[in-house]
């Protein structure tokens, strides 16, 4: 234990700062391990603000679009670090669609993004609770709500399709957002506008959460809407 003594005196920030360098993974894990009972997350990532967190996501998407992904934070060392605690810099509510893999389209890795997904990227109670946890407790600085091209949940809502089982609850959650575009499921532009209207609607729903709105007021969080194009792979912000 004597060998670890100096490490115990390192601040968490310094332990991280030097962790990738002379301390080495094993010693870093030992130093961080001493904080395991602390209520504070034990792995500190860059202390970014909301604007920087958003910029970090957008920069990752740019790399992905350009075919220049760096695949950061995806190795075993990173996995061992975040096993001790997480502090994601961003939270995302996106559609469960298999063509929208969040970490890939933003070129991020383990511990970077707190991701909540469901069909139609709808903000239901469980999703709101999860995102309150990801922001208030884990400290994500930006919350991105992502709709996407050719979203089946939105298209089905526009069609007024008869759907089996609990799928109808998804349609009900999207319906108020896209009423203007009802019946226009074959018009590509109308579908895009409906997807964006749904994103705005879900952002508004999230903003009604007292936990999230308090974080926004305190300048600790930004909620932003976005659209993902399957054709260009690009994320554009929805205002
Ligand atoms: Zn979808």
Image: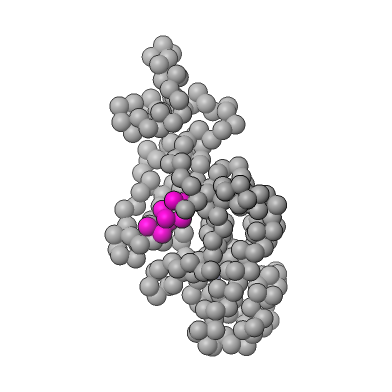
Q: What segment is highlighted magenta in the picture?
A: 52-59
Residue 43 drawn in magenta: no
Front residue of 82 and 179? 179
Front residue of 200 and 192? 200
Q: Position of residue 201 (x, y in %)?
A: 63, 69
Residue depicted at 61% across the width and 47% down the height: 218
Q: Does residue 38 appear in the picture of this structure?
A: yes
The residue sitting at the top extreme is 2
Residue depicted at 43% across the width and 66% down the height: 235
Q: Position of residue 165 (x, y in %)?
A: 70, 71
User: For residue 184, which quarter of the picture?
Assistant: bottom right
- Horizontal side of 167 relative to 151 (left or right) equals right
Tag count: 0
Residue 55 drawn in magenta: yes
Please determine whether, in this image, residue 116 is positioned above or below residue 38.
Answer: below
Specify how the rendered protein is coloured: one colour
Residue depicted at 44% across the width and 51% down the height: 52
- Horizontal side of 113 relative to 78 (left or right) equals right
User: For residue 191, which quarter of the picture?
Assistant: bottom right
Q: Position of residue 177 (x, y in %)?
A: 65, 74
Q: In what quadrant of the picture does the N terminus appear?
A: top left
């Amino acid at each position: 234990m004597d060998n670890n003594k100096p490490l115990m005196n390192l601040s968490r920030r310094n332990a991280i700062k030097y962790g990738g360098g002379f301390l080495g993974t094993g010693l870093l894990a030992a130093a961080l391990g001493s904080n395991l009972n602390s209520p504070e997350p034990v792995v500190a990532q860059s202390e970014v603000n909301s604007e920087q967190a958003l910029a970090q996501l957008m920069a990752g998407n740019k790399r992905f679009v350009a075919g220049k992904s760096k695949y950061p934070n995806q190795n075993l060392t990173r996995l061992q670090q975040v096993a001790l605690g997480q502090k994601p810099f961003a939270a995302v509510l996106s559609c469960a669609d298999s063509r929208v893999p969040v970490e890939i389209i933003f070129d991020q890795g383990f511990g970077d993004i707190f991701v909540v997904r469901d069909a139609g990227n709808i903000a239901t109670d469980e999703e709101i609770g999860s995102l309150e946890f990801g922001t208030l407790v884990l400290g994500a600085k930006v919350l991105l709500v992502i709709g996407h091209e050719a979203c089946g949940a939105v298209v089905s809502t526009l069609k007024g399709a008869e759907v089996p089982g609990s799928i109808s609850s998804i349609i009900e959650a999207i319906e108020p957002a896209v009423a203007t575009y009802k019946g226009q499921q074959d018009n590509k532009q109308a579908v895009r506008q409906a997807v964006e209207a749904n994103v705005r609607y879900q952002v508004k729903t999230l903003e009604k959460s007292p936990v999230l709105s308090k974080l926004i007021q305190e300048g600790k969080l930004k909620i932003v809407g976005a659209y993902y194009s399957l054709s260009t792979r690009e994320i554009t912000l929805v205002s």
